[in-house]
Image (cartoon, rainbow, N blue to C red):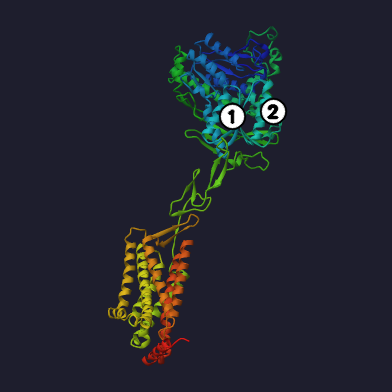
Amino acid sequence: MCFSARGGTFVDGRDAESCRIQFKLPGDYIIGGLFPIHVESYRSVSKVEAPMCKRFSDKGYLYFQAMKFAVEEINNSSSLLPNVTLGYEIFDDCDIFIDLQGTFAFVSRYHPAVTAVIGPTKSDAAIVTANILNLFCIPQISYAATSEKLSDKTQYPSFMRTIPSDESQIEAIILLIQKFWWNWITVIGSKNEYGENGKHKVISFATGEGICVASEGTISVQVSESKQKIINIIDNIATNEVNVIVVFADAQYAEYFFRVVIDMNVTGKVWILSEAISVRRMLSEIPNIKRIGTILGIAAKQGKMSGYEEFVLRDITAWNTGSHQSVKYSGLQEERQDSPDNSCTAVCIKHVPCTSDGVRSLLQHSEWRVEFNAYSAVYAVAHGLHQLLQCDSGVCNKESIYPWQLLKTLRRVNFSLNGIPIYFDENGNPPTRYDIIHWDWKDETVFFKVIGSYKPNPGQLQIDESLIKWNSQDGKIPTSNCSSECEPGQIKITVGFQPCCFICKDCGEGTFQNENECTPCDLNQWSPSKSTVCHNRSVMYLRWDESLSIVLALITGLGLLLNVLISVIFAIYLHTPVVKAAGGKLCFILLLALACSCSSVCFFIGELNAGICIAGQLIFMVSYTTCLSCVLVRSFQLVVIFKMATKLPKAYDYWVKYNGQYIFVLISSVIQLSASFVWIFSKHQVLERNYDISKSEVILMCSCTNLPFSVLSVTELFSLSLLCFVFAYLGKDLPKNYNEAKYIAFSMALVLISWVFLTLVLLSSSDGYTSAVKAAVILINSYTITVGYFFPKCYIILFKPQCNTTAFFQTCIQEYTRSRDAPQP
């Protein structure tokens, strides 16, 4: 071997070809170590012989040196373990087969002298060694094994570690995926304890967070099969259009995987690497790996080890110059016994960087992450021994101790190492510390740039996105979603079995998006299509400041003014023939009814309520009934006087004697008033709110849907209007002074037409102009009767006074009588 343990003994392993090594440094207390000085080459699992560990591990070399450095610092310290010397025994951890050799050596030849074991690196190897060490209660502190299984203290009570468990880094990976709104991923793991468990954990965590796994794959250890498996994995990624791939694997598997990926010309993807490979230089140096896309990863926090680089360089320089006089060799093959140079020129020289420049380059690109974990593991053992040996007085009690005693003490250690807290929780895990790494390329050289960090309990991920250079065609964040996210106001309709694959459906009018449902709005609310909230409806009614309301109010005022003027004229000329012929005092009742009917228009303007609806409906229906009754009575009287008085003299006498016209008007008005009271007290909704899901208004309307009231009222009004028209027709040949038939007929025709128009409007529309149409119909009816009945009489009174005499009326009656009695030709 081309590097040494200072002042120790180098012992070769059983197979010189594999360059498996063992270092031993005597001391008062021995610490066992398992470090991957060499790594296994790819081989067929069908071979049962010992693995050929031919490839030198630069990272394992640095881990190993970190332990040596920690031991030297502790042995040179006057405050930590004073007058106590630590020794170590280190085995090359290139395969589980070698781990077992080392572990059995710890518990057989040196037990209980080996007080603790540092390592191994891989989770599956750590599980195997933990099962053995548990039997002897020897504390084990791994610096790189992350399997969550090892947190189970019921199975592995003596296991601890200085690197967080897989569960913590998987949570960091999931948060990283969520950070960029990816939900369509592929998960790949290596076919070992670390990769298989990590892959299944990632899939489980991702599924629980609503992230869909489009495909998964395992990198096999069998070279003959693994390439085709990798090709199938890449084909699945292309088929599912996945842009984010999580790789949870050891370095050797990952190296082979990425070489195949590069050969298949995969580009533009986002690769999220687990902690074991995120800062591995051997991967970054694969030719053309830059082309595959953006590489992110999870890495253990960096630590500081002042003087470590100088220690390593001093160690390798001392070996290369042959100044290691204290190094002794034993158990070597005969051709290696001449000198250190001869041993280095044998087999190991082929695989180990033996020059100072090579080690200096290696140190230049190292970041002291896992190295610091190995360093802190040794210090944890030292602090445990310090407490157990009661060294606080400046001198340690050197009584014999047992590993199980140290195990109890280790669980309680809590100290700070170069500013970083070191302790173990109830599961033997350290404080979680992770950096988020981005592979930042400058030309063909990669820099492992720290772009963020992860903190647990609860999981918090902080990322500085400005530090990421996305290796995509447009330089923007790649998307990796089975379906594009729905817009606000849309819900997801799942397609197939993956919840991330869906189509988007708009929430219709009158509904809003409530999580993934379209929920109807309340009755007093509305929403347009694709809405996320409901809006309060605005109340719609005729407002006094609207132009239409002002016009209706002016017309109403003009109508009332006309009624007043006509009343004044009729009062002045009350005893003239024209006024008497129009009905005399009955005209004032008619004018009052017309004024009330016209005034009811004001109840349709402004915000409605139940009281306004009742008052408006009551005033209009009663006053308009009275109005029609007066017109009908007057038409009936004219027909009776000129055509029926002589035939039915007694009936006419009774009509005149008992004021039949007033009784009829009163009865008609009372009937309508009774119907109105039935409507008021029928517990029927007086005020209606008309809703339309596509409109933002709620229309206030006075209810007219009480069936009995509607039938009775309409029947009475229709009957009165029809009788008025009939009697007007019968009186078409009366004297011209009394001939009001054509005016009444014209008025009733307009009344019937207006009511038909209003009925059609009410049946076909329910918008805010319904009240305006009602008001307009009432004004038309009022003006029709006012103009048709009173204007001709006012014209005679004011402009033809000669026709407003008794003599003129008698002459007209005599002419009518002569023409009626004359024989027809």
Query: What residue type is disc 1 on?
Result: Ser
Disc 2 is placed on an element classified as helix
Q: In this rendering, which labeled residue sits more in front, label 2 or label 1?
A: 2
Residue 460 or 598: which is nearer the viewer? 598
Res 619 visible: yes
Residue 783 or 408: which is nearer the viewer? 783
Q: Eyeballing the image, is 564 above or below 674?
A: below
Residue that badge 1 annotates = 274
Residue 727 is left or right of residue 138, and the answer is left
Residue 205 is left or right of residue 618, and the answer is right
Residue 446 is left or right of residue 101, and the answer is right
**Quadrant location of residue 37?**
top right
| Residue 15 x, y percent position in the rendering | 65, 11
Residue that badge 2 annotates = 260
Tally of numbered discs: 2
| Residue 552 x, y percent position in the rendering | 44, 72
The disc at residue 530 is: none
Res 116 visible: no
Residue sitting at x 51%, y 22%: 149
| Residue 668 x, y percent position in the rendering | 33, 71
Rate crowding at label 1 as few (under 14), some (14 to 19) or many (20 or more) other CA atoms within 10 Å.
Answer: many
